[in-house]
Image: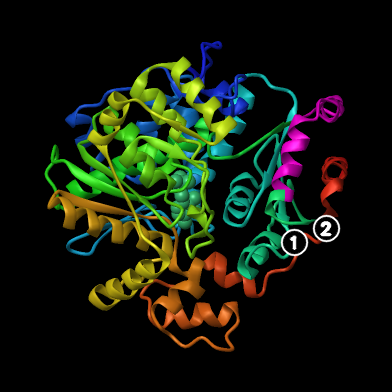
Amino acid sequence: MKYSSTRGNSAQVTSAEAIIKGLALDSGLFVPDELPQIDMSFIESLVPLSYEERAQKVLGLFLTDYSAEEIKTCVENAYGHGKFDCEGRAPVTDLGTMQVLELWHGPTSAFKDMALQLLPQLMSTALKKTGEQDKVLILVATSGDTGKAALEGFKDVDQISIMVFYPEGGVSKIQQLQMLTQEGANVNVTAVKGNFDDAQSGVKVIFADQDFNSQLKSKGVKLSSANSINWGRLVPQIVYYFSAYADLCKTGRIKAGEEINFTVPTGNFGNILAGFYAKQMGLPVHKLICASNANNVLTDFLQTGRYDRNREFYKTITPSMDILISSNLERLLYHVTGDKAQVADWMAQLAQKGSYEVDVKTRGIIKETFWADFVDDEATKKCIRQVYSQHKYVLDTHSAVAYQVAENYRHETKDNHVMVVVSTASPYKFNGSVLEALQVETEGLDEFGLLDKLREMNDQPIPAGLAALKTKEVRHKGVCGKEAMAESVLNFIET
Ligand SMILES: *Cc1c(COP(=O)(O)O)cnc(C)c1O
């Protein structure tokens, strides 16, 4: 299977090349030229398998230039070796009226682990397969969660090192501790004197600086990124849609062939797009429901066909969804229209004036599959409280947005297909907001006190990675000015 850009007819590449490159030369995103098709016997064959075995079968359909043995090793390194705290890796919890797909049993307790554990393995294997001699340095600017998940995924991976910049004082105490205590011989974490935008612009400047890149090249180093538009981050996410379906068959909750719905808390549109790929391949999915917070640019787009980022930006209790440009939407537009020139034109309009509007036909096709709604912080907290009182189950804020939108969907459409709510973070990761939603007194408690407090109400134990922070040694103390980020990169390479 070959991959090419969403925006033009630049050369086709293999999946290994797409994963090393990240972005196509014309700034488009890599997409597979055709989508593999599965039948019911494929799904039935997944039912008795482990998550790793299911992953091998699904990934093998897309990564046709990797050998079965290579995929097996990558998958085992990503999800095996005790990195996930439960046997199912991505288990489905039955709450009666809702099925909750828990994507946060990985090392950093957020759904980013599902992709960022596998991407480094795929990238390192790709470097070997393509005979690349240089070392790759991954640069990340983070406002919190992605940095830690990327560090965990890339630590001690062959031929690759990783450097993470975060805004000094701009991440939560837990997030900062998670990063500063990061182990691994190939990792560096540096605080930038500035805000997240400063850190992100700094990284962008480094990527674009030709002289700097040739200087690195002379030292045998190439830069790359781990952001959510890399095909190697998207493809791992297709797996859990199949795995959830297989689990529901296994428990007898559904019959093989029965259509189900998924509601997905959405930011960059990567997670829900993976669900779209699964549906296009033949997984029996009726609707994909896109859940947003007050930054409801996607709700408006999916309802009206007009994307407009020119609007107020809100900081919410679901920070991982505080996004106004959902990069992966570009892939959906390509698959729906098949028209690269048209996609390039919409993306140019987005870059120039911050908005574009799709035609009626495109809007119609999108609406056949997608439904969308959003909820504000108050409704999110109320949902956490209600689900807890009904089921003694604690949702994190992002997952609660999805849960509430799933209820809104049922209420409005009377559609009664089995509903899977995609849960993207452990409640311990957002314990302050969750405890506030549960109306628990938290005065005087520090981060670890909050964890213990939440544990009193939650059957799930505190994730080991979070509990261990209390005693872990701080290993990364570097701080730099926003003008000195390139210099820090050179210093890291020289050590
Ligand atoms: C990243 C993230 C999301 C958004 O996922 P997208 O793939 O960007 O749509 C939702 N919830 C949590 C907890 C996340 O970390």
In this rendering, which labeled residue sits more in front, label 1 or label 2?
1
Image location of residue 159, percent across then percent down: 70, 34
Q: How crowded is mark 2: few (under 14 residues within 10 Å), some or many (20 or more)?
A: some
Q: Are marks 1 and 2 in contact (CB under 8 Å)?
A: yes
Residue range highlighted in magenta: 198-221
Q: Say whether mark 1 is within 8 Å of ligand 1.
A: no
Membership of 228 in magenta stretch:
no
Disc 1/disc 2 C-alpha distance (Å): 8 Å
Residue denoted by label 1: 168
278 and 28: which is toward the camera: 28
244 left or right of 18?
left
311 and 386: which is toward the camera: 311
Work out which quarter of the rendered image holds the N terminus and state it.
Answer: top left
Q: In which quarter of the image is residue 143?
A: bottom right
Q: Which numbered marker is on residue 479? A: 2
Magenta: main secondary structure equals helix
- Which one is earlier in the sequence, the residue at label 1 or at label 2? 1
